[in-house]
């Protein structure tokens, strides 16, 4: 019986596989066309002139807590060589930039919260502060200096692209420096202490102390012994039920 059923099904295996292959190829081509249309096709008016418009946009939720922002001005340089080495050009640009620092609260769970009833202290073992993508504001450039005997349009575009990329990389490196990360963690500690202290104060623990630690700091705390007897969520629940 099973063989009798298997024989008709095997007859359609080839066409089904071919149909699935065509479906996958068609889906890949559609996605490729949509990306090409988004990135390279110029939107125009009825008269053929290019128009400023939103091509694609997407909004999404976030669980990141912004704790600080780094602001500054950056100088970026770029070089370009064309024409078998005969056409050399360079560019110097100055422009403002900013980098935001975040703590991903989605990575914070109940197991990261410790309560010391003797000292009425909440220890928050938080995820580390992370810098976001640098925002280099090229619309507010204060200096653009391009040198070269003959700078072609393509060379000018390449110089601009390289200067922007160099500025992004330099701003990112500055934001991740030990000094800046330490400063951002200080602001993050203050922001999280306020955030975690609010529910404690609401249930009568207004005098409780909140200690925030980040991953680079926690190895130094391994020798300390905390009297942690009750999860903080149970402490808050019990305190609320008594009111």
Image (cartoon, rainbow, N blue to C red):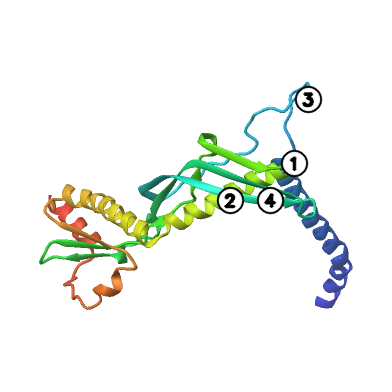
Q: Residue at x 74, y 24 (%)?
A: 45
- The answer to the question of whether label 2 and label 3 lie on touching residues, with beta carbons closer than 8 A, is no
At 76% from the left and 46% from the top, the residue drawn is: 33
Q: Are marks 2 and 4 in contact (CB under 8 Å)?
A: no
- Upstream in sequence: badge 2 or badge 3: 3
Mark 4 neighbour density, 10 Å: few (under 14) some (14–19) many (20 or more) = some
**Where is mark 4, residue-wise?**
80
| Residue 218 vertical position relative to residue 66 in the rendered view, above or below | below
- Secondary structure beneath dot 1 equals loop
Relative to 116, 26 lies left or right: right
For the residue pair 233 and 121, the one nearer the viewer reads as 121
Look at mark 3 in the image and give the residue it sits on: 48
Q: Which comes sooner in the sequence, label 3 or label 1?
A: 3
Q: CA distance from mark 2 to mark 3?
A: 32 Å
**Residue 202 versus residue 219: which sits nearer the camera?**
219
Determine the CA span between mark 3 and mark 4: 33 Å
Label 4's element?
Answer: strand
Q: Is residue 157 left or right of residue 132?
A: right
Q: Name the side, left or right, on which 211 lies relative to 133.
A: left
- How far apart are labels 2 and 4 at the CA level? 14 Å
Q: In this view of the protein, can residue 176 be seen by the observer? A: yes
- Residue named by callout 1: 152
Q: Within 10 angstroms of label 2, few (less than 14), some, or many (20 or more) residues? A: some
Q: In x, y percent, where is residue 194?
A: 23, 49
Q: CA distance from mark 3 to mark 1?
A: 26 Å
Q: Which mark is residue 165?
A: 2
Secondary structure at badge 2 equals helix
Q: Position of residue 70 (x, y in %)?
A: 39, 48
């Amino acid at each position: 019986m099973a063989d009798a059923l298997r024989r008709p099904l095997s007859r359609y295996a080839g066409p089904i596989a071919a149909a699935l292959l065509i479906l996958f190829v068609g889906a890949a081509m559609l996605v490729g066309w949509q990306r090409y249309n988004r990135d390279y096709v110029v939107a125009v008016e009825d008269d053929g002139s290019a128009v400023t418009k939103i091509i694609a946009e997407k909004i999404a939720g976030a669980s990141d807590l912004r704790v600080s922002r780094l602001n500054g001005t950056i100088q970026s340089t770029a070089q370009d060589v064309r024409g078998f080495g005969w056409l050399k050009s360079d560019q110097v640009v100055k422009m403002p930039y900013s980098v935001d620092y975040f703590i991903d609260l989605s990575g914070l769970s109940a197991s990261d919260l410790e309560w010391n009833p003797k000292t009425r202290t909440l220890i928050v073992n938080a995820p580390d502060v992370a810098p976001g993508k640098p925002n280099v504001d090229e619309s507010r450039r204060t200096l653009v200096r391009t040198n070269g005997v003959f700078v072609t349009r393509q060379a000018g575009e390449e110089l601009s692209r390289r200067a922007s990329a160099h500025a992004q990389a330099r701003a990112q490196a500055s934001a991740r420096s030990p000094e800046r990360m330490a400063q951002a963690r200080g602001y993050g500690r203050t922001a999280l202490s306020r955030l975690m202290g609010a529910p404690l104060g609401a249930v009568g623990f207004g005098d409780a102390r909140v200690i925030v630690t980040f991953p680079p700091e926690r190895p130094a705390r391994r020798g300390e012994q905390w009297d942690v007897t009750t999860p903080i969520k149970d402490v808050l629940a019990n305190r609320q039920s008594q009111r």
